[in-house]
Amino acid sequence: MRLGKVNLQVVSDGTFWEDGGGLFGLVPKVLWEEFATPDEKNRVCLETRCLLIEGRQQRILVDTGLGDKLTAEERAFLNVKGERRLLQNLANLGIGPMDIDLVINTHLHADHCGGNTIGEGTDGLLPTFERATYCVQRLELADALFPNERTQATYRLENLEPVQQRGQLRVLWGDTRITEEVRVVVTPGHTRAHQCVLIESEGEKAVFLGDVASWPVHLERLAWVSAYDVEPLVSIETKRSLARWAVEEHVLLLFEHHPQIMAGYLHPTERADRFWLEPVEIE
Ligand SMILES: [Zn+2]
């Protein structure tokens, strides 16, 4: 789709399945079941939608999905199907790895940066996008390099080290303008330095939400926070200000993980802590 002078294209790295209790945290299953049908293992389906932004200056890829370095056990655990999903979907658009100038990771959980690197073993790994600069928040990088007992399963050096070693990592110190049309804004809660990507061109605005709101319902109901969020009360405040801004400025919201809804506009309700999303089809 066009947003002003920018071309936005959703590019999927496929789906995976994770426990509904992870996605919905403290929300009882009797409530979240209205929004998702779990499988026999209580897992719900998530997309790994990445965003390709083609502006006048650069071609930017936001997030890189799960990638192809998962073990057979991990693939079964997450019910991941197929290989080179992101690269194939990029190729279908006529775009090869060398065509990407910049990669922005919203954060460094394994389902957002697994495609940062490619190859086998520790020696054989390389950045997937050989020419690209990878933009990562400083505090997110610190948390990924020195995880704690709760976060260590999702932060994997294999997604970072080859990028760092090749000198392709750009560390961002907070909110940063990346190009004329694209900037990143730190949106803490899910992780301490999660960042959203804002695209503005000719008065039109869009935001790629990452895991600030994995699904629309996370924004429609501010209290619904995933179990993975390290600072859930901060997540609620981040979502509150983001939701108000999105309503006031008619911002197109882009969702990374919902299996069907990829975009929409948010509207207020009579309750201050609730909103409703008008889904929009984007090409
Ligand atoms: Zn995620």
Image (cartoon, rainbow, N blue to C red):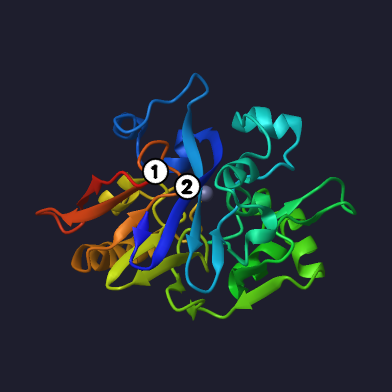
| 108 or 118: nearer the viewer | 118
Q: Is residue 165 above or below residue 257?
A: below
Q: Identify the residue shown where x is 52% and y is 23%.
A: 41
Q: Amino acid at mark 2?
A: Ala
Asked if residue 46 lies left or right of residue 264, the reply is right
Mark number, residue 227: 2
Helix, strand or loop at mark 2: loop
Task: Identify the image quadrant of residue 26.
Answer: top left
Q: What's the residue at 31%, 53% (across, down)?
A: 219
What x and y, as percent, mark residue 6?
41, 65
Residue ID at (13%, 53%):
269
Is any part of residue 146 visible from this angle? no
Q: Nearer the viewer, residue 135 or 144?
A: 135
Label 1 element class: loop
CA neighbours of label 2 inside 10 A, class few (<14), some (14 to 19), many (20+): some
Residue 65 shown left or right of residue 234 in the figure = right
x, y (%) of residue 270?
9, 54
Q: For residue 80, say whether it is visible.
A: yes
Q: CA distance from mark 1 to mark 2?
A: 7 Å
Report x, y in % for residue 256: 45, 49
Residue at far top of view = 40
Where is residue 109 shown, x and y percent of the image?
A: 60, 54
| Comes first in the chain, label 1 or label 2 | 1
The residue wearing badge 1 is: 26
Q: Based on the displayed image, in which of its 4 quarters is residue 140 positioned?
A: bottom right
Residue appearing at x 62%, y 29% in the figure? 81
Asked if residue 100 lies left or right of residue 246, the reply is right
Q: Is there a contact, CB below 8 Å, between mark 1 and mark 2? A: yes
Residue 83 sits above or below residue 198 on the image = above
Which amino acid, by three-letter code, is at mark 1?
Leu
| Residue 104 numbered tag | none
